[in-house]
Image (cartoon, rainbow, N blue to C red):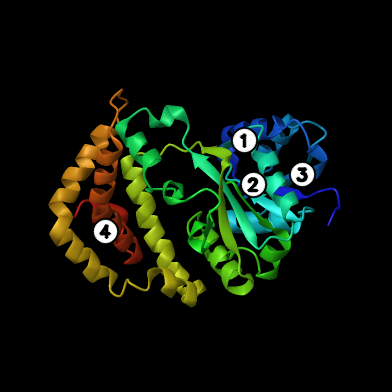
């Protein structure tokens, strides 16, 4: 480990996301101090090194490393970057993150306070203002549909399910000790909480929520894509049963028969689910309408059966389009 480098920023990307990556690097470049205390490592999940050209946007005082690899997914790209990391801690960002001048110093401050902490520091992740200018955007931002921070307390300690690799720092040696991410996870789904599960079981790690360390998630998700994502999450959960049975059973042990569960939910909620989805599509249109927190919470609760149906369809290996047209 380089004694002067405390923190290695780990950023996986791929060739068609250069614009997003450039925005993230612009935010990192806005960090005015401590340039000798952190480094930036970008790992392209492809042999095309074109995205690495944007590393030139960083000031020369910030150390940077650009890597490529054969396509294996974000888990493999992060592992590749971690192998080159010099920092005692690693800080994970998705390539569509947006940060400001206080994000990296916020993590450095926590690390300096307790460099041997049995803790991963999770910063706040919000949605950009332009993506919440609709009732649907307010629903995503104001509930736990994607991120769980709305139900977390500042400074609170939380288990592995909150090990979200977006604006999260953790000790590098701990990640290496448990074997890093499992390359068998092909998408950016569940691979992070599975690593968090192993860190918690092996080393007693907890996730501490630090909302003053801010970032934003520049990834617009419309209603159909949201349910497709949940369908894919079900597919990856089924794969997790082969990769880490104990982890799978702790998280999804309730799912004994996904086909029966899907059929039961479809019978009970199919019609209302379709009506709800039509409403969510209308809500996704730009609008000045402001929805009350109580109404957002009500719609959030109402959408859960449809979300569970999409998950079960993915777990049961039923194609999304087939499922979507069946209820």
Q: How far is mark 4 from mark 1, CA to CA? A: 35 Å
Q: How far is mark 3 from mark 1, CA to CA? A: 15 Å
Q: Pinpoint residue 30: horizontal percent, then vertical percent.
A: 69, 29
* Mark 4 crowd level (few <14, some 14–19, many ≥20, 10 Å Cα): many
* Mark 2 crowd level (few <14, some 14–19, many ≥20, 10 Å Cα): many
* Mark 1 crowd level (few <14, some 14–19, many ≥20, 10 Å Cα): many
Up-down relation of residue 197 to residue 150 (above or below): below
Q: Which mark is residue 38?
A: 3
Look at mark 4 in the image and give the residue it sits on.
309
Q: How far is mark 2 from mark 4, CA to CA? A: 32 Å
Q: How far is mark 2 from mark 3, CA to CA? A: 13 Å
Q: Pinpoint residue 242: horizontal percent, then vertical percent.
A: 47, 74
- Disc 3 and disc 4 in contact, CB within 8 angstroms: no
Placement of the C terminus among the 4 image quadrants: bottom left
Look at mark 2 in the image and give the residue it sits on.
11
Q: Which mark is residue 24?
A: 1
Chain-order first, disc 3 or disc 1? 1
- Disc 1 and disc 2 in contact, CB within 8 angstroms: yes
Which quadrant holds residue 18?
top right
| Of the two numbered discs 3 and 1 in the rendering, the one whose residue sits closer to the viewer | 3
Depth check: give the residue in front, 211 or 270: 211
- Disc 2 and disc 4 in contact, CB within 8 angstroms: no
Q: At 78% across and 31% down in the image, what residue appears?
A: 59
Residue 318 shows in the view: no
Placement of the N terminus among the 4 image quadrants: bottom right
Residue 233 shows in the view: yes
Residue 306 relative to residue 120: left or right = left
Chain-order first, disc 3 or disc 4? 3
Q: Disc 4 on helix, strand or loop?
A: helix
- The mark total stands at 4
Residue lying at the far right in this picture: please name it: 3
């Amino acid at each position: 480990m380089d004694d002067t480098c405390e923190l290695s920023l780990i950023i996986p990307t791929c060739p068609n996301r250069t614009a997003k990556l450039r925005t993230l690097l612009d935010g990192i470049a806005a960090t005015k101090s401590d340039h000798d205390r952190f480094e930036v490592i970008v790992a392209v999940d492809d042999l095309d090194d074109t995205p690495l050209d944007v590393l030139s946007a960083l000031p020369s005082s910030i150390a940077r490393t650009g890597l490529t690899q054969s396509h294996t997914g974000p888990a493999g790209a992060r592992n590749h970057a971690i192998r080159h990391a010099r920092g005692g801690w690693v800080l994970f960002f998705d390539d569509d993150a947006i940060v400001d001048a206080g994000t990296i110093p916020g993590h450095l401050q926590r690390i300096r306070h307790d460099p041997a902490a049995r803790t991963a520091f999770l910063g706040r992740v919000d949605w950009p203002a332009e993506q919440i200018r609709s009732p649907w955007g307010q629903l995503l931002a104001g509930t736990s549909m994607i991120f769980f921070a709305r139900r977390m307390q500042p400074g609170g300690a939380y288990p592995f399910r909150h090990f979200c690799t977006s604006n999260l720092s953790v000790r590098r040696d701990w990640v290496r000790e448990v074997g890093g991410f499992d390359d068998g996870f092909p998408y950016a789904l569940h691979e992070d909480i599975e690593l968090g599960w192993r860190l918690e079981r092996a080393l007693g790690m907890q996730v501490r929520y630090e909302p003053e360390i801010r970032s934003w998630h520049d990834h617009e998700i419309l209603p159909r894509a949201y349910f497709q994502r949940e369908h894919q999450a079900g597919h990856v959960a089924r794969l997790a049963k082969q990769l880490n049975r104990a982890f799978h059973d702790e998280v999804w042990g309730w799912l004994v028969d996904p086909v029966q569960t899907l059929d039961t939910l479809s019978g009970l909620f199919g019609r209302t689910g379709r009506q709800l989805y039509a409403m969510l599509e209308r809500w996704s249109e730009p609008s000045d309408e402001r929805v009350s927190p109580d109404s957002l919470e009500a719609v959030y609760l109402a959408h859960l059966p449809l979300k569970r149906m999409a998950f079960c369809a993915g777990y049961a290996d039923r194609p999304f389009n087939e499922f979507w047209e069946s209820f």
